Image: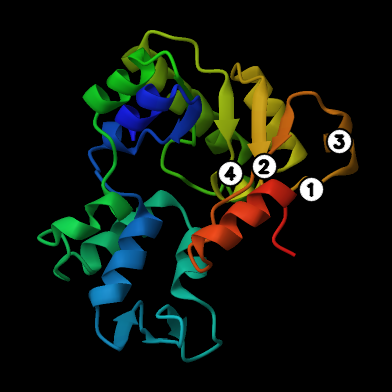
Amino acid sequence: MLTLLKKYQLSATFFITAISEAGYDILWNDFLGIVTKYGAAKVAYKNETFYKDQYGKYISVINNEPLAEKIRSGGYNLKIEMMELFSTIPFRNKKDDEDFWLQMTPAEIRELSDCEFCTIGSHGYFHNDLSRLSIENAFEEMMCSKKYLENITDKKISALAFPYGTYTRSVITEAKKAGYDKLLALDFHFKEDESDLTMRERFVVNPYISASNQMIATIKGKYF
């Protein structure tokens, strides 16, 4: 990708987590996604059974709650526990899948940052849902991620893309205290967001549609 950006002189911003600093090369949700692909049709987790639905996602037999949603609502210790539980499911020997889950190393982040066409932004520390954390923990994640990236790039990191696009007004306030002045969300959740000059809307790529339809949606700024 970096070669193409340089060749065509295209600008791009990369929003990166600090999960590598914690000793992990994969995000918990990417981990769950890929082990679901290779895992059994049914799995047991915390005395509850989950089955693969028609979309290949693990769903609770008790209340139809997705396993991903259950884990997303918990702290990072819960996520680590899940990753350890399913660590025997093979996927690391499948090199073709690495683009899906393998996180960038500090050296790769630095190489991106050194490119005149690339800008680095934060995507949180653990990729936790900041709106579901205590405000103290949310601030710590935003601050630690910022420091991690600034130490690597020797540049000020001023942009933050909220993981999952979710946030609260308190999270916005704490993000500004941490030194961010560009805050990206999937959708604005509050009326005052429209007049907040730090707020930006971001548009995600839909992996379930064709490239041509994705281009149309990107131009329109919406999928419908």
Q: Is residue 73 visible?
A: no
- Residue for badge 2: 185
Q: Which residue is mark 4?
A: 130
Q: Are marks 1 and 3 in contact (CB under 8 Å)?
A: no
191 versus 81 height, above or below:
above
CA separation, marks 1 and 2?
9 Å
**Mark 3 surroundings within 10 Å by alpha-carbon count, few (fewer than 14), some (14 through 19), many (20 or more):** few
Mark closest to the chain's N terminus, 4 or 3 = 4
Q: Which mark is first along the chain, 2 or 4?
A: 4
Image quadrant for the N terminus? Answer: top left
Q: Residue at x 45, y 21 (%)?
A: 9
The residue that label 3 is drawn on is: 194
Tag 2: amino acid: Ala
Which residue is at 88% across, 36% downward? Answer: 192
- Compared to residue 33, the image places residue 20 above or below, namely above
Q: Tell me where residue 67 appears, x and y as whole percent.
A: 44, 73
Foreground: 207 or 55? 207
The residue that appears at 23% across and 69% down in the rendered structure is 86
Work out which residue is located at the far top of the displayed protein and give it.
Answer: 154
Question: In terms of secondary structure, where does tag 4 sit?
Answer: helix
**Could you say whether the residue bearing mark 3 is in a helix, strand or loop?**
helix
Q: Quadrant of residue 5?
A: top left
Mark 3 touching mark 2, by CB under 8 A? Answer: no
Residue drawn 48% across and 36% down? 124
Q: Which mark is residue 189?
A: 1
Q: Is residue 50 above or below residue 76?
A: below
For badge 3, the amino acid type reads Glu
Q: Are marks 4 and 2 in contact (CB under 8 Å)?
A: no
Tell me whether circle 1 and circle 2 mark residues in contact (CB < 8 Å): yes
